Amino acid sequence: MKSSPVRNAPPLALWVALTAFPLLSTFFFSSQDAETSGSLSLLILHHILSVFPPLSALGIPFLHRVLRKLAHFTLYCVLGVGLRGLSTYQRRLPAVPGVVVTGMLCAALDEFHQHFSAGRAPSVADVLLDTCGVAAGCALISVLFHLTGRARAASA
């Protein structure tokens, strides 16, 4: 069995899963028309409000928007984690800039794809938010690599 370039690092399959899950999820969600997408996020919001009723004082429209933006950020943060882990298996590109640029390209392609779903429109603000999510996930894993003494092996 071939060992990872980062000593005692999680297996390659974990990084692949953490990369594939957000990509497949965003493709699925971006394929939904505006009504279906809005209904799903409202359903989730109402469940959250049933657990935390005081939040309703902030207003449903505001909370709905925040929930949708948090979903963007979170999925792309997971993508940043996965891509940063995968970056330890290559030595040609600088890891952090490569991860952020790759994540930004994925976000832009997702917004372009969303353009073809009824009632949906691409958003530059969402690409920027998604890129921030990727950068946050990448930073998290980079810090963990550093704290566990793996920074040297994972900094390619």
Image (cartoon, rainbow, N blue to C red):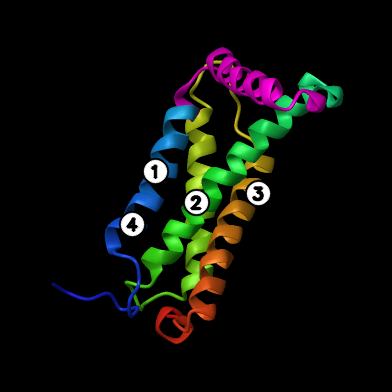
First-in-chain label (3 vs 2): 2
First-in-chain label (2 vs 4): 4
- The quadrant holding residue 84 is bottom left
Q: Residue at x 46, y 72 (%)?
A: 95
Residue 19, given in percent of the width and then of the height, sits at 39, 51
Q: Verify whether residue 153 appears in magenta.
A: no
Labels 2 and 1 touching (C-beta < 8 A): yes
Mark nearest the camera among 3 and 1 is 1
Q: Residue at x 47, y 48 (%)?
A: 106
Determine the secondary structure under disc 4: helix
Which residue bears the numbered disc 4? 14
First-in-chain label (3 vs 1): 1
Which residue bears the numbered disc 3? 128
Q: Residue most toward the right?
A: 57
Residue 56, given in percent of the width and then of the height, sits at 80, 22
- Left/right placement of residue 119 relative to residue 12 reads right
Other-residue count near label 1 (Cα within 10 Å), few / some / many at <14 / 14–19 / ≥20? some
In what quadrant of the picture does the N terminus appear? bottom left
The circle drawn on residue 78 is 2
- The quadrant holding residue 88 is bottom left
Real-space CA distance between mark 3 and mark 2, rounded to the nearest whole angstrom: 16 Å
Mark nearest the camera among 4 and 3 is 4
Which residue bears the numbered disc 1? 21
Question: Which range is magenta?
Answer: 30-55
